Image: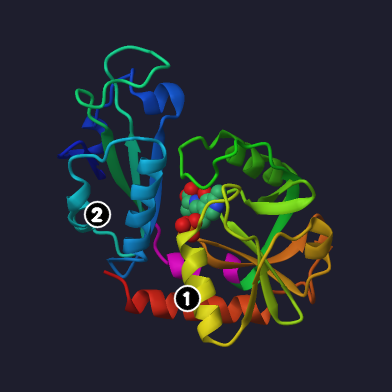
Amino acid sequence: MRTVYVNGDYLPETEARISIFDRGFLMADGVYEVTSVLDGKLIDFAGHLARLERSLNELDMKKPAAFDDLLEIHRELVRLNGIADGLVYLQVTRGSDGDRDFVFPDAATTEPTLVLFTQSKPGLADNPAAKKGIRIISIDDIRWGRRDIKTVQLLYPSMGKMMAKKAGCDDAWMVEDGHVTEGTSNNAYIVKGGRIITRHLSNDILHGITRAAVLRFAREAQMEVEERAFTVEEAKSADEAFVTSASAFVMPVVEIDGVPLGTGAPGRVATRLREIYLDESRKAAV
Ligand code: PDD
């Protein structure tokens, strides 16, 4: 059985308890991070911690008391659960003052709730999907306006994955005012004439930690990067496409709304970036 972390305690997952009045449960008043683990080590940990701090600040949520111990807590959970390859999920909510109220509870007396758990994913970096590429559909982006904050409001992304599944595809890209924002749980890219094009950072998308690393490696490898919005039509006529996230790393996209891209197989740029990202981030893992 898994050992999980709840507010200072390491417990068997069946013994972990959270109040039914927790604002994460009642109001999606919480933020999260997902950090991947390869060979027992954490990938891009500093980036995830920095984004967590930013998400908390943007929502005026106080830091959990154990904030400075988060690296140790991640490592201890990886050790206790014998994770070689997998993920660590972390969630902070505004906690509960024992009732339901739209008004935030007094931060001086109400502690945030901190939960972490691991997911074992043997062979995470050798996902066979990376060799075949994934097929995506486009859907309307009807999410709220602060997608840069990594909140636990994941109902629409979850519905988007179901729409993709129903269409016989793997994932969905969300579209607003004719332009792709991002994938349901990843950042979106196209490649045209060797140029990598991905939406610029704003409140409209999550500022992916994998995105930041991949763009840095791409520039270091002398690849051209253009940070701007692109349309679905432009994507359909691209040479290749891919997505990035902590759990998928760099994942080639081979079809958009039924239109195959390039040769219909994973592209050279996506394949190369996946190799570079995995190599470099393994070297920097903690
Ligand atoms: N999702 N955009 C969205 C909407 C996301 O949910 C994610 C991550 C990303 C990629 O961010 P990063 O590279 O920091 O993982 C972009 C995580 C993996 C999840 O919800 O499981």
Residue 264 x %, y %: 77, 72
126 falls in the magenta region: yes
Marks 2 & 1, CB-CB < 8 Å contact? no
Q: Quadrant of the C terminus?
A: bottom left
Q: Residues within 10 Å of mark 2 (few under 14, many from 20)?
A: many
Secondary element type, mark 1: helix
Q: Which residues are magenta?
A: 121-130
The three-letter code of the residue at mark 2 reads: His
The mark nearer the N terminus, 2 or 1, is 2
Asked if residue 87 shows in the view, the reply is: no
Relative to the observer, which residue lies in front, 258 or 62? Answer: 62
Q: Quadrant of residue 56?
A: top left
Residue under circle 1? 277
Q: Quadrant of the N terminus?
A: top left
Q: Establish if 126 lies above or below 27.
A: below
Task: Determine the residue positioned at 76% across, 81% down.
Answer: 193
Q: Establish if 82 lies above or below 148.
A: below
In the displayed structure image, the side of residue 265 where residue 36 appears, left or right: left
Relative to the observer, which residue lies in front, 246 or 264? Answer: 246
Residue under circle 2? 74
Secondary element type, mark 2: helix
198 falls in the magenta region: no
Residue 169 x %, y %: 71, 52
Which residue reaches farthest bottom? 222
Q: Residues within 10 Å of mark 1 (few under 14, many from 20)?
A: many
The three-letter code of the residue at mark 1 reads: Tyr
Relative to the observer, which residue lies in front, 157 or 30? Answer: 30
Q: Quadrant of residue 121?
A: bottom left
